[in-house]
Image (cartoon, rainbow, N blue to C red):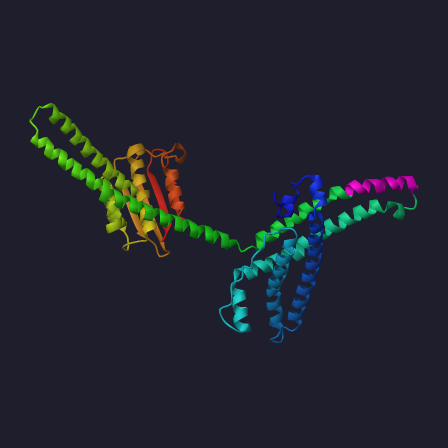
Amino acid sequence: MPVRNALEALSLRPTVFLRSAWPWRSLAYLLGGVLLGSATILAVVGLLLAGTVLSVLVIGFAGYVATVLSGIVVARVERRRLRLVDEEELSDPHQPVPGKGLRAWLMFRLREQATWRELGYAMVSAGVLCWMDALVVFGTGYTVLGTLLAPLIIDDEPLSNTIWFTLAGIPLTVILAYPITAWAGARAAMARAILAPRDDRLVEVTRSRARLVDAFEVERRRIERDLHDGAQQRLVALSMQLGMARLELPAGSAAASSVAAAHDLAKQALTDLRELIRGVHPKVLTDRGLAAAIGEAASTAPVPVDLDLRLPGRLSPAVEVTAYFVVTEALTNVAKHSGADRAAVTAWTTDRGRLIVEIHDDGIGGADPAEGSGLVGLADRVAVLDGTVTLSSPEDGPTLVHVEIPL
């Protein structure tokens, strides 16, 4: 298995790990951290002093600006140093400057979140991490040299005693390769966590998830269209043919009974298919929008449903589909589990660009997602669009499902 960073190297067999370059690379990384932190401290102190001394002049402000921007330089150096202990390259989170000139560059960089995150890392590196690097490096070096060079350093002990120190220093040097590598790996992980363009992968995951949702809904519509225009039409034709054959056969004959049974089965299959089509993707949702689809679902619900739908018109297909199935699933739960006499569905959009849907019933309450009432699947469906589901269902009711979906 290829090893890509120092922490993974620790899982190697001792003979393989100790012969590898990872302990030396880790030591070099920590030494570089000491030097980088020391240079950062000197540079920041110098810039702050210059800004303070020259504060009576306009150019004094440049010292403070340079202090803020120093994090960019530190972060750039750190990204290069990380390659010592982490072979995965850390990309630069800064965006290209749209304008030209120094003023445009400064204004753009000072507004970037990455600039301030890098300044924070520079302060943490100079104020804490470099001192810990120094403690590990110089503490390890002092221990190793103190034992290996014991005969040269200790004068008031017999040579036979100091030789034991030297012999003990050999395995000690080998053992200390592990804490050095472990700290270097942990140090690199902290640097990566702070400096990584943390939104890049999240944005890509979000975008890919949105593409999957859109592709899934396109496929649902295709299936609904194929069932509606294909299988359903054939079942309608079959039902009509069986009905006509049923009329032509003598009443009470064996053939008439068989055809009547087949006719009834065809009608039942047609009814089942229509329910299936509605479950895959209701045609009314595609043709007339969310309000009409919720109205149709409410009209067929087992309990009376009051509607208050204040929607501005058509929403995005993904939002409409998600909201529709949230309502239908919630109304199904009302009918199955709540014992309610009445339910209500309210939907509206906010100025913050969110669709709010609330399903309320006057049932017995006590709804628990862990009991398999479909609420977990409902929440998962909403989460695909970065929405949220809130449930309020005390014992003795009422139950309120509050859903928010970004538009």
In this picture, residue 34 sits left or right of residue 57? right
Q: Is residue 142 visible?
A: yes
Residue 160 counted in the magenta span: yes
Q: Is residue 362 visible?
A: no
- The picture places residue 198, in percent across and down from the top left corner, at 52, 54
In this picture, residue 89 sits left or right of residue 324? right
Q: Is residue 144 or residue 331 the one in the foreground?
A: 144
Q: Quadrant of residue 223?
A: top left
Count of all numbered marks drawn on residues in the image? 0
Q: Quadrant of residue 362?
A: top left
Q: Is residue 219 or residue 255 the one in the foreground?
A: 255
- The picture places residue 399, in percent across and down from the top left corner, at 33, 38
Residue 87 counted in the magenta span: no
Magenta stretch, residue numbers: 157-172
Residue at x 68%, y 59% (from the top left corner): 36
In this picture, residue 72 sits left or right of residue 328? right
Type of secondary structure dominating the magenta stretch: helix
In which quadrant of the rendered image does the N terminus lie?
top right
